[in-house]
Amino acid sequence: MKPQLGSLLSIDQLTTGQIEAVLRLARRMDPNRPSRVLHGKRVVLLFYEASTRTRTSFEFAAKALGAVTTLVTATSSSIEKGESLIDTGWTVECIGADVIVMRHPNSGSADLMSRYMHVPIVNAGDGMHQHPSQALLDAMTMLNHKKTLRGLRVVIVGDVYHSRVARSNAELLSRFGADVVLCGPLDFVPEVASTLAPGVTVSHDLNNALQGADVVMALRVQKERLAGRHHSVEDYIANYQVTAQRMKLAKPDAILMHPGPVIRGIELTSEVADGPQSCIHEQVRNGVKTRMAILAMTLGAA
Ligand code: CP
């Protein structure tokens, strides 16, 4: 296994060994015990889209390893004046970036950026395409509760079609032998989603999908995406909201996950989000450790 990851653009790009190495290193990371392994390194956080968890945890992760960070957002930077993605990338590279962590609303933007830059690009979410660090922290969270990913029944419910989290998770989990069920209304989970990876199936019946589930992952559902489709918000809640009653259909030791931001009252109830099976806060905490491992491996300091 090469200790250096290079750019992290998608789950697809990683070997199984590299995924295992990130997870192993993430488990050893402790954000409360600062280290200097990235001392002198400069991490640019280039965010064209809103973020709380990813942006903050990459920043804390970099600082916990001794790097310095700077944030460039689409507003209050020259992006607002019309500077292109690649010109912005070249600019931050010339200023001294050692790695660019970027989030962008367009699928493929991180990959495009990586073709023009000499420094590694870490994809912090590109459109509907990929969110590899989220899938890695989700795998770490599952492995904190389950011995292995192999054979786990993982039900991912919500707007799968628009979800880079669902895509990245389905690819990673199926690679490690989990049975992934993508669930939601037809508009959000087209039948073709089952071709995403081997071991991935589609269901439009949540009560059925939840039978025997080990992991239930609810996804964000934007109200405006429900409006005008076949399903109203009320229909969605009636058929797909994760409730305490529905959690009883899963295994008794099933865990509940959500990548955030959580929209309470639509995708899940507060009772479930704050309940004993919820790992939502743990996912956020694991985000810092996972991103420490990613930055260390990307910059060859693992
Ligand atoms: N899960 C996630 O990507 O959250 P943010 O949009 O807040 O970064």
Image (cartoon, grey):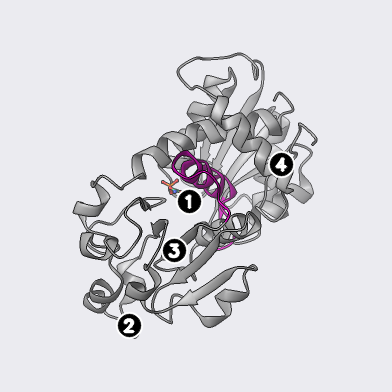
Mark 2 within 8 Å of ligand 1, using the beta carbon: no
Mark 1 within 8 Å of ligand 1, using the beta carbon: yes
Query: For numbered disc 2, what is the local secondary structure?
Result: loop
* Disc 4 and disc 1 in contact, CB within 8 angstroms: no
Residue 47: x and y in percent read 52, 44
* Mark 4–mark 3 distance (CA, rounded to whole Å): 24 Å
Crowd band around label 2 with a 10 angstrom C-alpha radius: few (<14), some (14–19), many (20+): few
Query: For numbered disc 3, what is the local secondary structure?
Result: strand
* Mark 2–mark 1 distance (CA, rounded to whole Å): 25 Å
Vertical comparison of 210 with 24: above or below:
below
Span shown in magenta: 125-150
What numbered label is drawn on residue 302?
none
> Tag 3: residue type?
Ile
Q: Is residue 75 magenta?
A: no
Residue 229 visible, this angle: yes
Q: Which residue is mark 2?
A: 228
> Tag 4: residue type?
Gln
What numbered label is drawn on residue 18?
4
Q: Which residue is mark 1?
A: 49
* Label 2 vs 1, first from the N-terminus: 1
